[in-house]
Each structure stands twice: as C-alpha cells, then as structure tokens.
C-alpha cells in the first residue's frame, strides 16, 4: 500500500507575509549572486539542511513557473510535492506545497530571493510560511523549531555562523 497524501490549499503571494507561521532569513553572502542561485537550483539543492534528506526536481530544465519538485524531510516522515508559482531566473522563485505525506499543514509556501551586492557578494532572503491544519496547531512551536534549522543550517553553510 502506498503512502497517504494530504492535499494542501493554494496560496496567494501575500500569504508569505501574512501566514500564521512565518520565518525569514536574510543572509549577506560573500559569493556572486549567480553562484548562490546555481546552488539553489542545483540537481539536489539544500542538502546542507539537516532536516532534508532529498530535494529532487520532477520537472525538466529549463525551470520556470509550473516547475515541480519533491522533498523528503525528517528521515522520510514527511514528503512534500511542491509547485513553483513564481520563477524569475537568476533572481527569485516561490513555491506552494500541493501535497504532503503528513497532515500537518493546511497551507505552506516558501520564497527565495537572491539580490546582487556588487560583483562578489549577494543577499539571499528566504521566507517560509505555513498554516497548520485544524487540530495540528499544537505542533506549531515544534514546527517553528524544525523549520528554523533550515535558516541556521544555511547560515552555517555560507560561513556566516
């Protein structure tokens, strides 16, 4: 028997700034914006994040609006199917989770923004936004702690902590 899937609701761009659960990391990185963007869109990005075991694109390149990927988190306890609703090549992309294997979130989205700061530096801003399903709000503090590791691991990856 296969894994159960729980549908998540779509989001508007404003959800990234209004969701009940919001995290934001802004990183001043001493690397060119193109290099950071390349890491974020690599074959298996974000594997420096300890709660992620696999991040795989399920759409062919070139990526754009409509691109999909699957993320395996927490040792396989939760798997996410993501759909990118914004894609500005070399600069920004945003996704919404369409399905998850655990019924924690009613809505969940992320936004990645890479802005050049001269030839050899950039700012990477990562927004994470979620809304728990009814009855799962009690897990919000634990979810916040787990999701915060994405930001602390990213800071460590770029030598900022």
Image (tube, helix red, strand yellow):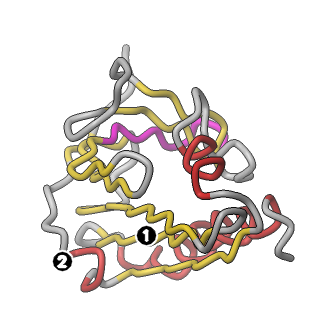
Q: Is residue 67 left or right of residue 24?
A: left
Residue 74, given in percent of the width and then of the height, sits at 63, 47
Quarter of the figure with residue 157: bottom right
Q: Which mark is residue 14?
A: 2
Q: Residue furthest top?
A: 1
Residue 70 within the magenta-colored segment of the rendering? no
In this view of the protein, which residue sits in the foreground, 156 or 107? 156
Tag 2 secondary structure: loop
Please identify the quarter of the rendering in which residue 19 is found. bottom left
Q: CA distance from mark 1 to mark 2?
A: 12 Å
Please identify the quadrant where the N terminus is shown: top left
Q: As rendered, which of 151 and 158 lies closer to the eye?
A: 158
Whether residue 115 is situated above or below residue 98 in the rendered picture: below
* Coordinates of residue 140 in the picture (x, y in percent): 45, 78
Residue at image coords 26%, 66%: 133
1 or 2: tag closer to the N-terminus: 2
Q: Please provide percent x and percent y for residue 113.
A: 44, 65
Magenta residues, start to end = 74-82
């Amino acid at each position: 028997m296969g894994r159960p899937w729980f549908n998540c609701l779509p989001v508007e761009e404003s959800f990234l700034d209004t969701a009940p659960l919001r995290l934001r990391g802004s990183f001043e990185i001493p690397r060119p914006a193109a290099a950071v963007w390349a890491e974020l869109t690599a074959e298996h990005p974000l594997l420096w994040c300890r709660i992620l075991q696999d991040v795989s694109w399920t759409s062919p390149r070139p990526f754009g609006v409509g691109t999909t990927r699957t993320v395996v988190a927490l040792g396989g306890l939760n798997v996410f199917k993501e759909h990118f609703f914004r894609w500005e090549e070399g600069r920004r992309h945003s996704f919404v989770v369409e399905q998850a294997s655990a019924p924690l979130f009613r809505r969940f989205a992320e936004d990645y923004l890479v802005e050049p700061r001269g030839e050899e530096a950039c700012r990477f801003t990562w927004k994470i936004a979620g809304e728990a399903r009814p009855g799962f709000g009690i897990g919000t503090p634990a979810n916040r702690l787990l999701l915060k590791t994405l930001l602390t691991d990213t800071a460590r990856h770029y030598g900022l902590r």
